[in-house]
Amino acid sequence: ETLEKGGYEHFMLKEIHEQPRSIKDCFRGRLNAAEGWVSLGGVKDYEQKMINAQRIVMVACGTSWHACLVGEYLFEDLARINVEVEYASEFRYRNPIIGENDIVIAVSQSGETADTLAALELAKSKGATILGICNVVGSSISRITDAGSYTHAGPEIGVASTKAFTAQVTVLTLMALSLAHKKGTLSESKFRTMLSELEVIPEKVKRVLERNAEIEEISRIYKDANNALYLGRGSSFPVALEGALKLKEISYIHAEGYPAAEMKHGPIALIDEEMPVFVIATKGTSYEKVVSNIQEVKARKGKIIAIVTEGDTDVKEMADHVIEIPDTDEHLVPILATIPFQLLSYHIAVMRNCNVDQPRNLAKSVTVE
Ligand code: G6P
């Protein structure tokens, strides 16, 4: 087992550090920025159908559901395709309105999650086209779907999903870009810039991982918290949800992810000097608005740990701690911004003597309802 961990203390840490590589593996044969193309062979024949679809429904559970939420922003903003994201467990029992013109995409690391599988079977029985984004080759979901794309993240052992999540987001990004290009919703120059930005993401992930020691220090300060709040806007909102999920899964600290603007409708009541608030405050369209959310937290003496774009000075002045991530296209921020949260939860869980790779009551793959 020590050998399998490749010198790391836990599988989770190993898997976090594998991300520059797993994202690159995900690109293999699918992306070439110099030649200006992106292609997902597995779903190629269904692209026109996706473009024509009245809507695409994405179904998943847990971390994979968060990847779908990022996918929703990408598909809608880049390819202007209407997407709805559903918890598989809710979708399957809601008598959903679904028919032959719908496309249902299931996102699942294991490809075995009972609710996700059942949601797909239901959609299929109603005539929808069903597609899959799975990590495990030959899994049940990959076998029942009409077509799909593998994430190629390699085996993920840690119960808390890390590299599978960034691979799912990567596949969804490739898909959104391919659809946008085909549909003509992105200018050729914007398309090419995004491909180049995407191609260097693994390098940038590596640079985020280099901040591990700094993130470990921040973790030490907040390891005894009872609650934590995670805030983000736009496609960073799902990153906030995922950050909160990671923390509660492995460190057993109660954490909630919220769209930053919703804070005033509830969570703000919880803020006091004991409350760490993790905020994604990278440069982009909602930067100013997030900055004002940070000020609201500070006015109530909350502690701010902000993920910012390298070189940021404004947030640095307000926040208790900042973690810098390299600048990138706004659509690609989720991949980078999620890394510090993975490391934070990892270190906090280790410091609290929690079983990082096998947290209590959780299973890697939930094959029963
Ligand atoms: C379990 C795992 C999570 C995972 C979820 C969905 O709860 O602990 O890490 O996100 O199932 O699993 P899937 O294999 O469908 O992505």
Image (cartoon, rainbow, N blue to C red):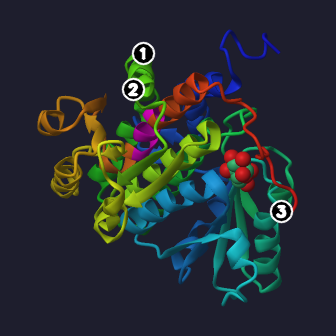
Give the residue number, with chain letter if any, for mark 2: 221
Q: Which mark is residue 338?
A: none
Mark 3–mark 2 Cα distance, whole angstroms, equals 39 Å
Q: Earlier in the sequence, mark 3 or mark 2?
A: 3
Q: Badge 3 local density, few (<14 within 10 Å), some, or many (20+)?
A: some
Horizontal relation, residue 99 to residue 169: left or right: right
Q: Callout 2: helix, strand or loop?
A: helix
Give the residue number, with chain letter if any, for mark 1: 213
Horizontal relation, residue 223 to residue 186: left or right: right
Q: Nearer the viewer, mark 1 or mark 2?
A: 2
Q: Position of residue 220 (x, y in %)?
A: 44, 23
Return the residue nearer the eye: 121 or 144.
121
The residue depicted at 64 percent of the width and 81 percent of the height is 102
- Identity of the amino acid at label 3? Ala
On screen, residue 303 above or below 54: above
Identify the magenta region.
Answer: 334-340
Q: Nearer the viewer, mark 3 or mark 1?
A: 1
On screen, residue 350 above or below 252: above
Q: Earlier in the sequence, mark 1 or mark 2?
A: 1
Q: Position of residue 273 (x, y in %)?
A: 29, 43
